[in-house]
Image (cartoon, grey):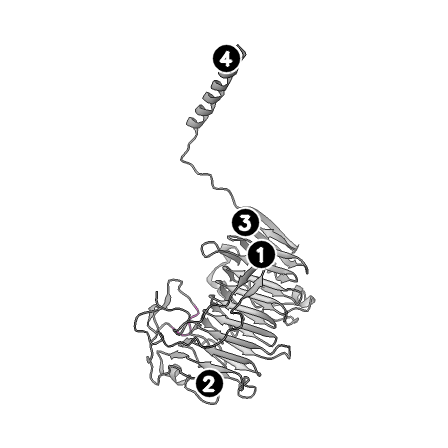
């Protein structure tokens, strides 16, 4: 009797479960709402995959602590508070190509009016920051101007002055490691980066729509050992790369820049300076396989404070301009550096790189970027097979950060950041 009673109960329960299943609408998929949190002040730990972080005021990673930002996290900076992101500890932001980390502003603020940002500050890493990694990260709409009340001014960070436009990334520890790969920096008011020390890898990044009246994509000072490779730098206000040994820090700034594509840089600067790559103040600079298309000048030196002429190397640069004034301004002279094995013409249109999908006559004064453009090279491009691989990069064996080794990529035998598809 007891067994029969138990069996009946089991059958009844099964029947109820089956009935519930039949009445459910099984075609509906419940999408979990992203985790949201609001932060200000000190932060550390982990911001979990896919979450939304509302930053209501300046945030700071304390020395000795770390913040990890997982893939798909959206960090929304308050456009009234215009926060600064201060890193005294370590920061690891690692997204994926399909699910990047985004450090941005609310969508309603991403308008033409704020094309050059100024809606939050930037990432400011002090000398106590030993590791900063950005992998598949989008940084946008920052570059706010400091005041006496700014955290960076009070803490003596960056230039420690009011009235300065904050870069997207400032790094200052000569013994630290800075790795920025597979990322995009766009819609910033002035410099994208300002680097005053560290072992540095910048590779496979995109820089565009930056700089109102000045500013570079990568601005390097003394204390830096850097590999800069496979980056696309479009229409910076001044130079794509500004390389200097200013600051009297050890080691001497030593930069190996190879297989980068720079386009339309320098034309929007109100006063004449550079417009592609600028070298100065005894920097040890080695340049290989860089493609300069429609930039305002060729590789340019400060004639009063030139690069380290004993150690610097310039090889295998391809120059192209669709206008004669552009061609004229990359011809070698006392300011414009003549490299070895350069591909350089005399007439407008010489050495068309044959990009897959980019109209080479795009307005040089326009900072607007079309994400559908494709800077790979077509068959027959003069850049194909004209690169060199006979040089040494700093971090061939990699930099270890947060338990992962990041390696400077192998050089290619073509010129520019992209070969054929």
Q: From this viewpoint, which residue is outermost toward the left? A: 380
- CA gap between label 1 and label 2 equals 45 Å
Cβ atoms under marks 3 and 1 closer than 8 Å: no
Q: Quadrant of the C terminus?
A: bottom left
Task: Look at discs 1 and 2 and give the one toward the viewer.
Answer: 2
Q: Earlier along the polypeptide chain: callout 3 or callout 1?
A: 3
Q: Earlier along the polypeptide chain: callout 2 or callout 4?
A: 4
Mark 2 Cα shell of 10 Å, populated few (<14), some (14-19), many (≥20): some
Residue 408 is inside the magenta segment:
no
Residue ID for mark 2: 337
Q: Quadrant of residue 144?
A: bottom right
Quick check: 361 left or right of 230? left
Q: Which mark is residue 193?
A: none
Task: Look at discs 2 and 3 and give the one toward the viewer.
Answer: 2
Q: Earlier along the polypeptide chain: callout 1 or callout 2?
A: 1
What element does badge 3 sit on?
loop
- Dominant SS type (magenta): loop
């Amino acid at each position: 009797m007891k067994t029969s009673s138990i069996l009946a109960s089991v059958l009844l329960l099964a029947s109820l479960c089956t009935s519930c299943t039949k009445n459910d609408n099984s075609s509906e998929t419940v999408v979990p709402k992203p985790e949201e949190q609001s932060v200000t002040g000190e932060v550390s730990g982990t911001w979990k995959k896919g979450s939304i972080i509302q930053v209501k005021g300046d945030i700071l990673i304390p020395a000795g602590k770390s913040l990890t930002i997982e893939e798909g996290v959206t960090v929304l900076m308050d456009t009234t508070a215009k926060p600064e992101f201060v890193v005294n500890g370590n920061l690891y932001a690692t997204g994926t190509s399909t699910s990047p980390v985004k450090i941005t502003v609310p969508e309603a603020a991403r308008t033409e009016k704020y094309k050059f940002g100024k809606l939050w500050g930037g990432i400011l890493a002090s000398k106590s920051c030993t590791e900063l990694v950005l992998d598949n990260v989008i940084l946008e709409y920052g570059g706010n101007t400091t005041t006496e009340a700014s955290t960076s001014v009070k803490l003596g960070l960056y230039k420690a002055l009011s009235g300065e436009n904050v870069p997207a990334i400032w790094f200052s520890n000569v013994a630290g490691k800075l790795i920025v790969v597979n990322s995009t920096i766009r819609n910033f008011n002035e410099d994208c980066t300002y680097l005053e020390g560290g072992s540095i890898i910048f590779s496979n990044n995109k820089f565009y729509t930056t700089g109102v009246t000045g500013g570079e994509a990568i601005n390097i000072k003394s204390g830096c050992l850097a590999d800069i490779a496979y980056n696309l730098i479009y229409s910076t206000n001044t130079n794509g790369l500004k390389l200097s040994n200013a600051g009297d820090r050890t080691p001497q700034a030593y930069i190996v820049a190879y297989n980068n594509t720079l386009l339309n840089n320098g034309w929007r600067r109100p006063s004449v300076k550079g417009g592609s790559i600028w070298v100065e103040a005894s920097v040890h600079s080695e340049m290989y396989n860089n493609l300069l298309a429609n930039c305002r000048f060729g590789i340019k030196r400060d004639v009063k404070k030139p690069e380290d002429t004993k150690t610097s190397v310039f090889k295998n640069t391809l120059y192209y301009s669709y206008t004669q004034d552009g061609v004229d301004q990359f011809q070698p002279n006392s300011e414009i550096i003549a490299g070895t094995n350069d591909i350089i013409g005399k007439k407008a249109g010489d050495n068309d790189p044959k990009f897959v999908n980019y109209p080479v006559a795009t307005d040089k004064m326009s900072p607007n970027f079309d994400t559908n453009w494709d800077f790979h090279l077509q068959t027959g491009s003069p850049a194909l097979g004209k690169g060199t691989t006979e040089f040494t990069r700093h971090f061939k064996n990699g930099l270890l950060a947060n338990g992962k080794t990041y390696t400077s990529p192998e050089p290619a035998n073509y010129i520019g950041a992209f070969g054929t598809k």
